[in-house]
């Protein structure tokens, strides 16, 4: 009988220990899924996959309500690769973002983000920007839903990086009515003159 009581005590102790440690273990296991910080990696000079480069470049323009075409996409794609040459971790961020953009476009009836019309692209940008990122619900949902997980990571740093990259790009300066960026070869005072007024 004492042996049976001792076994029960051990079982109850083990169950109690598991009940106490389980939340910590689950939290530790899901921490990476809930993480939204960028993970730097060594420089990566390999070219981006064309479809990934195109989708992320188009997103950079769509953040400002611009539909990029041809040479503009190539310029922004080049800038994306320059950033990877400093921090290879961006390759993973770009690939995840491109996949998310295509999934959201398909949910709106388009074949891909690239093939989506302006209304669909701007709806996707709205979803990206307006949905909560750091609420308890968003953090918990990120542990089981890939779309939430990727969207939160995009919002944490990638959107800001793309916005800054686009604003400083030659593409953006041309859209503001200038022939080139300040500092590029050409008329040194051109940037001081007013650009073309763009109607909203």
Image (cartoon, rainbow, N blue to C red):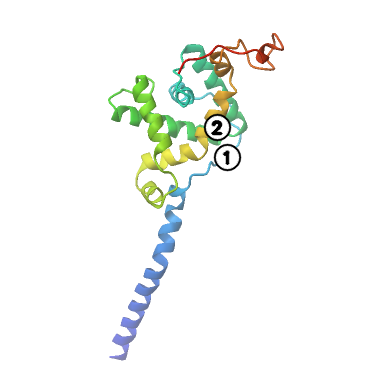
User: Along the line of sight, which residue is nearer the eye, 197 or 12?
Assistant: 197
User: Along the line of sight, which residue is nearer the eye, 142 or 128?
Assistant: 128
Query: Which residue sits at x=38%, y=25%?
Result: 121
User: Along the line of sight, which residue is nearer the eye, 192 or 51?
Assistant: 192
**Whole-percent x and y of residue 154?**
46, 37
**Whole-percent x and y of residue 90?**
53, 34
- Helix, strand or loop status at disc 1: loop
In which quadrant of the rendered view does residue 166 lie?
Answer: top right
The residue most toward the bottom is: 1
Query: Which residue sits at x=42%, y=39%?
Result: 150
Query: Which residue sits at x=43%, y=55%?
Result: 29
Query: Which residue sits at x=42%, y=38%?
Result: 151
Q: Is residue 149 above or below residue 124?
A: below
Q: Is residue 170 above or below residue 146?
A: above
- The residue that mark 1 highlights is 40
In primary-sequence order, the first of circles 1 and 2 is 1
- Helix, strand or loop status at disc 2: helix
**Whole-percent x and y of residue 44?**
58, 30
The residue most toward the right is: 188
Image quadrant where one finds the N terminus: bottom left
- The residue that mark 2 highlights is 161
């Amino acid at each position: 009988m004492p042996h049976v009581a001792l076994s029960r005590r051990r079982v109850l102790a083990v169950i109690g220990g598991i009940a106490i440690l389980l939340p910590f273990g689950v939290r530790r296991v899901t921490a990476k899924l809930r993480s939204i910080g960028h993970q730097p990696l060594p420089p990566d000079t390999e070219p981006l996959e064309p479809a990934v480069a195109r989708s992320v470049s188009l997103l950079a323009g769509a953040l400002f309500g611009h539909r990029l075409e041809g040479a503009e996409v190539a310029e922004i794609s080049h800038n994306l690769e320059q950033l990877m040459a400093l921090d290879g971790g961006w390759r993973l961020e770009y690939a995840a973002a491109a996949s998310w953009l295509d999934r959201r476009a398909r949910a709106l009836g388009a074949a891909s983000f690239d093939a989506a019309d302006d209304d669909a692209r701007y709806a996707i940008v709205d979803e990206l920007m307006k949905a909560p990122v750091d609420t308890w619900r968003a953090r918990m949902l990120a542990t089981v839903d890939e779309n939430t997980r990727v969207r939160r990571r995009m919002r944490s740093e990638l959107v800001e990086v793309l916005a800054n990259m686009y604003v400083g790009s030659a593409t953006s300066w041309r859209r503001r009515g200038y022939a080139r960026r300040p500092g590029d070869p050409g008329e040194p005072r051109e940037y001081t003159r007013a650009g073309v007024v763009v109607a909203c």
